[in-house]
Image: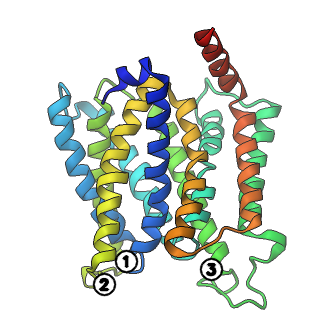
Amino acid sequence: MYSGSLRSSPTAAVGAFLLLAVLWGSSFVAIEAGLAYFPPLLFAGVRYALAGAAVLAYATVVSDRWIPRGREEWLGVGVAGGFVIAAYHGLLYVGELHVSGAIAAVVVSLSPVLTAAFAALLLPSERLGPLEIAGFALGVVGVAVIADPGGAGLAAGRGAGPLGFVSPELLGVALVFLAAVSFSIGAVLLRPLRTDLPIAALQGWAMVVGAGLLFGGAAVTGESPAGIAWNATSIVSLAYLTVLSGIVGFLLYFALLDAVGPTQLHLVSYVEPVVAAVGSWVVLGHLIGGEAILGFVAILAGFAALERREIAAYVATHREFRS
């Protein structure tokens, strides 16, 4: 999807990057709005069943093959569908029952930091030095500040949450944090499983498999289609998440990944919370608190420490290009 034009035009690449940040950042707000009318796992399942069918149709048109071959490719589909689609979105949607989309976006911005940490643990070629460990610790501290500023997240005296002793806000942040963990583990496990299966085909199959797992989870937890309230807000939310954030967003992501590489594309995770905070305020009237801003700064600092070499190399390359 136009990756050649993005490589040749820095302006086009920046525009595509910002558009992706807007689409994915605003998706946290669309999820929050839609959860008033959808059971969470069914909501995510319907979204990815529709998006997966569309992305697979796209793959049949633009790719030389779209059906996985052999155990390794199907294993890759299973990892992506299980971790990156089903576990990540299932936990995210349930988490957003308890925290705002803006807070969820800030916690999810920890994903690149977690990915680097899990890569060091699971892949023999990856290692974390003292600065990288400090960067990971900064990111975790950022989430801790968001989840429990000053210990206020414990439910003593505030009204217990579903676990009896944890506040709903702390539970929501914990679930979204586990969503980010699931996404990061899936991203790391996929690295040795990458083959020449086109990325659009891999993502389309992953969406379909993930949707099936989400539907299974919905059935186990007692969610029913009868719990869906179809109205203008729920339809717009689902359509936005499926078409713009889902199909258009992922195709844009594929093009940017090919054009600028994963380290630069990770930076989109740090624009998304800004978009989500503005959108949450404009659409839902929710303001993000100072502790969330402080936590986000800590997470961003952790990412800079972990990816400092790649960021420096990228800046140096662009200086040479401009000169």
Dividing the image into 4 quarters, which one contains the N terminus? Answer: top left
Q: Nearer the viewer, residue 62 or 12?
A: 12
Regarding mark 3 in the picture, which secondary structure is present there? helix
- In this rendering, would 116 be left or right of 228? right
| Residue on which disc 1 sits | 39
Which residue in the protein does label 3 denote?
A: 168
Tell me the SS state at disc 1: loop
Q: Nearer the viewer, residue 17 or 199?
A: 17
Depth order, front residue of 32/176: 32
Q: Residues within 10 Å of mark 2 (few under 14, many from 20)?
A: few
Q: Do the residues labelled 3 and 1 touch (CB within 8 Å)?
A: no
Say if mark 2 contacts mark 3, CB within 8 Å. Answer: no
Image location (x, y in percent) of residue 198: 28, 29
Residue at the spot of label 2: 227
Q: Is 292 on the left or on the right of 268, as rendered?
A: right
Quadrant of the frame with the C terminus: top right
Of the two numbered discs 1 and 2 on the same chain, state the one appearing first in sequence: 1
